[in-house]
């Protein structure tokens, strides 16, 4: 028996810091025991009924993890808010884990173009992304993702499980579908979450979507009894991803004057620097998430976040750098730095993903022109990432000490 489909719930996602702060303030009363009780429910009333839906702002660091945690722990004890606090740390965990094993992202990128080319002639793939599989809940979530740019986290897990184990589609294609359409699409969280469901992240441990679980946590909206796979055999990869040493964190900008370069990874990064820049620019343009076009909602939020970052930093419109190639971006940064008489460029340390790839190429070209690129860490990342090399429990057990290091109430 299947439940009745429902139109995607439209939730307000205004891509600016002020809207994120308002959303945080409204949800703060619910970040304690109420969150722990209701967070798994994907209800017809939308995500704000059970979860904060703050992830698009946190993904671009219009809101930082640190300030969200600070606000929560000023309102609740760590014991009462443990579930919400853990969810915030999961994002940092995935980023840190991928920093230790960047070959996971590199291999995913290498495989994706051929998989997408082959998928163009696959009716099962076309039906899945269009929401035409005949599985009501899955089809609803596929349409909801495209129409709103957001899915409840529990729905993401069900969707990924059905994609891999019922529809038997490659996990990489599902990860690409999410990364193109999610407003909070993050290379680490998205890639590793899909691999976790498929048994590649924690080897052998998979997540099986069950009809009774879906019925319970959608309040009976959906009940795909008899439509889902009844087993979830772990996927095999046949590749070992070596663990790499993390880059030593750096926090201080150079003593000399510098140009601040913002990216979509951290649009409030300059706010925390002890000394302001002599000039600023922001990296915009296509973000390299996928060989295919980014979804309208995801792209609109990203572009709006960039505009908000520009406005808050005082960067003039002519310093919004839209690159078409790494060499073109480097030329614009070099020209701007030389115009201002600067030989240092400072930016936030970008975790593994498209932005990090661009910055790596940029740094090499800048060096040829006698300009040094400084990638500086946030204290939060420097404390979290070293504890994220294995399972989440390794990070979870040190959360209190991390919070104390950040001068938060514990």
Image (tube, rainbow, N blue to C red):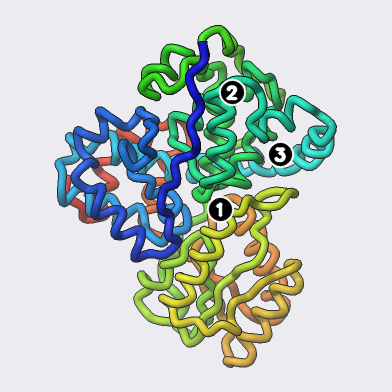
Q: Nearer the viewer, residue 49 or 237?
A: 49
At a point 21% along the width and 55% down the height, the residue shown is 407
At a point 75% along the width and 39% down the height, the residue shown is 112
Q: Nearer the viewer, residue 151 or 310?
A: 151
CA gap, disc 1 and disc 3: 27 Å
Answer few, some or many: residues within 10 Å of disc 3's Cα (few below 14, many 20 plus, some between 14 and 19): few
* Percent position of residue 404, x then y: 22, 49
- Per the rendering, the mark at residue 202 is none
Mark closest to the chain's N terminus, 1 or 3: 3
Foreground label between 1 and 3: 1
Mark closest to the chain's N terminus, 2 or 1: 2
Q: Is residue 199 visible?
A: no
Q: Secondary structure at mark 2?
A: loop
Is 408 rendered above or below residue 190? Answer: below
Q: Secondary structure at mark 3?
A: helix
At a point 53% along the width and 33% down the height, the residue shown is 193
């Amino acid at each position: 028996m299947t439940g009745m489909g429902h139109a995607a719930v439209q939730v307000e996602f205004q891509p600016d810091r002020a809207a994120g702060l308002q959303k945080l303030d409204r949800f703060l009363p619910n970040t304690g025991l109420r969150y722990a009780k209701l967070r798994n429910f994907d209800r017809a009333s939308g995500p704000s009924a059970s979860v904060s839906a703050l992830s698009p702002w946190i993904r671009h660091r219009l809101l930082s993890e640190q300030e969200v945690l600070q606000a929560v722990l000023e309102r609740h004890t760590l014991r009462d808010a443990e579930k919400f606090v853990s969810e915030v740390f999961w994002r940092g965990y995935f980023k840190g884990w991928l920093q230790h094993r960047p070959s996971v992202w590199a291999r995913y990128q290498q495989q994706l173009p051929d998989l997408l080319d082959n998928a163009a002639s696959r009716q099962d793939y076309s039906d899945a992304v269009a929401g035409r599989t005949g599985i009501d809940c899955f089809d609803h979530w596929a349409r909801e993702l495209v129409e709103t740019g957001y899915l409840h986290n529990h729905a993401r897990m069900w969707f990924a499980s059905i994609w891999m184990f019922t529809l038997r589609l490659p996990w990489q294609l599902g990860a690409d579908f999410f990364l193109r359409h999610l407003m909070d699409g993050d290379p680490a969280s998205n890639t590793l979450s899909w691999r976790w469901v498929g048994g590649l992240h924690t080897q052998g441990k998979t997540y099986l979507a069950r009809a009774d679980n879906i019925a319970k946590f959608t309040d009976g909206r959906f009940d795909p009894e008899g439509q889902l796979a009844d087993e979830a055999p772990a996927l095999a990869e046949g590749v070992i991803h070596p663990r790499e040493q993390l880059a030593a964190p750096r926090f201080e900008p150079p003593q000399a004057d510098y140009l601040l370069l913002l990216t979509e990874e951290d649009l409030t990064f300059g706010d925390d620097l002890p000394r302001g820049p002599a000039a600023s620019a922001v990296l915009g343009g296509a973000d390299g998430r996928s060989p295919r076009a980014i979804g309208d909602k995801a792209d609109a939020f990203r572009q709006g976040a960039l505009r908000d970052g520009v406005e808050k930093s005082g960067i003039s419109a002519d310093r919004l750098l839209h690159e078409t190639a790494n060499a073109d971006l480097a030329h614009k940064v070099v020209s701007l730095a030389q115009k201002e008489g600067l030989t240092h460029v400072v930016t936030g340390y970008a975790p593994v993903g498209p932005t990090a790839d661009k910055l790596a190429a940029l740094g090499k070209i800048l060096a040829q022109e006698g300009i040094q690129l400084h990638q500086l860490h946030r204290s939060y990342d420097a404390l979290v990432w070293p504890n994220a090399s294995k399972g989440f429990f390794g990070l979870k057990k040190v959360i209190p000490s991390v919070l104390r290091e950040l001068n938060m109430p514990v």
